[in-house]
Image (cartoon, rainbow, N blue to C red):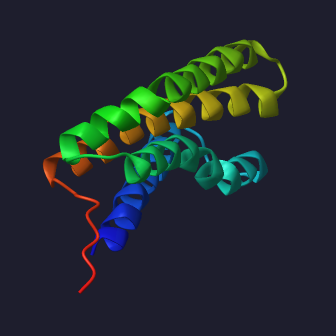
Amino acid sequence: MIVFVLHAFPTVSIFSVLISVIGAVTIAGWTLGVIEAILFGILAGFSVDYVIHLAHAYSHAEGDVEERVMAAYAEMGTSVFSGMLTSVVASIPLFFCTLTFFAKFGTFLCLTILFSWIFANLGFMGLLATFKISMDRKIG
């Protein structure tokens, strides 16, 4: 059960990012073309990073659920936040490009990274804390 949950919750986070980004760009008026198809093709890859880092840190932490959540944030929180911040800042100049691909890629990257960080930190870690997913493995 523990292994299933530790795989199911990140999957929920990743699907939430996918739905949020596709929804946001649809609301922004994007239609499916070659550029959008390329961007949607790499969307899942960008969505995985933060949640997997936090899941790994949680699974290797010691203690009860609250201690594990705090340890995961202590171990990976700064790195995950720094990665999000640098990626978002790097995407901002692309907003001003005259080439459509780069302008759309900047928007796509910024949205994906922001949603990924939000769902990893608030969604995934919140699910672990709410449902009290312990990592105790009892053999017997």
Horizontal placement of 66 versus 77: left or right?
left
In percent of the image, x 25 and y 46: which residue is there? 63
Residue 135 percent location from the top left of the image: 29, 60
The residue closer to the viewer here, 101 or 109, is 109
Is residue 19 at least partly visible in the picture? no
In percent of the image, x 34 and y 73: which residue is there? 4
In percent of the image, x 72 and y 33: which residue is there? 105
Quadrant in which the N terminus appears: bottom left
Horizontal placement of 96 versus 8: left or right?
right
Horizontal placement of 43 versus 116: left or right?
right
Quadrant in which residue 101 is drawn: top right
The extreme right residue here reads: 99
Is residue 45 at least partly visible in the picture? yes
In percent of the image, x 28 and y 81: which residue is there? 139
Residue 122 in the image: above or below residue 12: above
Q: How many marks?
A: 0
The residue closer to the viewer here, 46 or 61, is 61
Residue 29 in the image: above or below residue 61: above
The extreme bottom residue here reads: 140
Residue 95 percent location from the top left of the image: 69, 17
Quadrant in which the C terminus appears: bottom left
Residue 52 percent location from the top left of the image: 51, 50
